[in-house]
Image: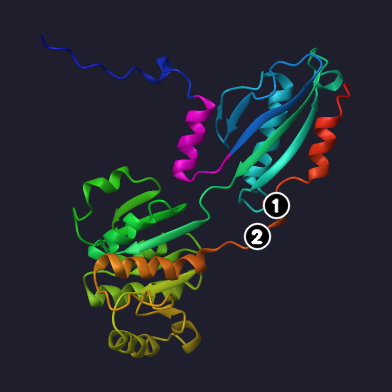
Amino acid sequence: MTVAPQSTPPASERRPESWHAALHRLQRDGAPHALATQVTSAGSTPREPGARMVITLDAVFDTLGGGTFEYQVIEAARARLAGKDGSAEGGLSLEAFSLGGRSGQCCGGFVNVLVEVFPGSATTLALFGAGHVGTELVRLAAPLPWQVRWHDSREAIFPDWAAEQPRLACRHAPNPAAAVAALPPNTHALVLTHDHAEDLTLVDALLARGDVASLGLIGSTSKWASFRSRLGKAGHDEATLARVRCPIGMAAGGTGGDKTPYAIALATLAELLPLTANVERPDQRGLDPAVLRAAFNTTTVT
């Protein structure tokens, strides 16, 4: 008996995505989002402690009960997701809401909501070259919370499994200068293509941008000596040229003589990790314990 394949229902008939499914997807993809959790309840409230919803700049998943109260939670979360400079403000905040009077709700209760803002991937890594070392770098970087942009000038070069790796974008880049111009500011770049002339063009374009967070080039010391001379003649000063790491993977102690693609990729990532470290901010220290004690020890209803 032949079983007919099941068709995917249209979007209008699909069940809304739950908060936990949305949270998993957004964290997997490194996208900015907020998790709002009701942590206290006094008097009459739409939901009980433990109710959760996920909020992004353009969507919400699940509910804390609706009404003006929920609207205020969404607005508070989105204000922090938008940030003062367009970047999400990560960290925790404990918000208090009265469900009577000016709120327009008749419950008359009081709730505290913990809002956790996840700013998304703070690091972008641009890889140029889908050869053996580039492939190992992409595999090793998979668990890290980075957005990886993988470029190659050759067609149909990327492996099939790359389409399933989270936070990875594969890009056919026949025009190196255009690929470099499309990168976001403060990108960490690694140049390891199959062609020395393409490597030189990429390094020249990356240095010319002036806003690349770090730049590594695969190759020997003799290759870099040749490149350094030509890049100097092209107008790059010594301070700019000193920013290029070549050979890559040496700052972390090298590969111990192992020249396999895996060893080179491993040493390169070990070298790159300290360069991507974020300076700790006060908002990453969590909530003041006194604030939590006050929230859980008082049950005043207004």
214, 201: nearer the viewer: 214
Relative to 15, residue 165 above or below: below
Q: Which residues are magenta?
A: 18-33
- Residue visible at 27% across and 59% down? 135
233, 53: nearer the viewer: 53
Residue 191 vs residue 25: left or right? left
256, 195: nearer the viewer: 256
Choose the circle earlier in sequence order: 2 or 1. 2
Name the residue beneath numbered marker 2. 280
Q: Which mark is residue 285?
A: 1
Residue 101 makes an appearance in the image: yes
Relative to 141, residue 243 above or below: below
Please provide percent x and percent y for residue 70. Answer: 69, 24
Are the residues tagged 2 and 1 within 8 Å (C-beta)? Answer: yes
Residue 287 vs residue 81: left or right? right
Please provide percent x and percent y for residue 106. Answer: 80, 12
Residue at mark 2 to residue at mark 1: CA–CA distance: 8 Å
Q: Which mark is residue 101?
A: none
Three-letter amino acid code at disc 2? Glu
- Is 32 inside the magenta-drawn segment? yes
Crowding at dot 2, Cα within 10 Å, few <14 / some 14-19 / many 20+, comes out as few
- On the image, which quarter does residue 227 sit in? bottom left
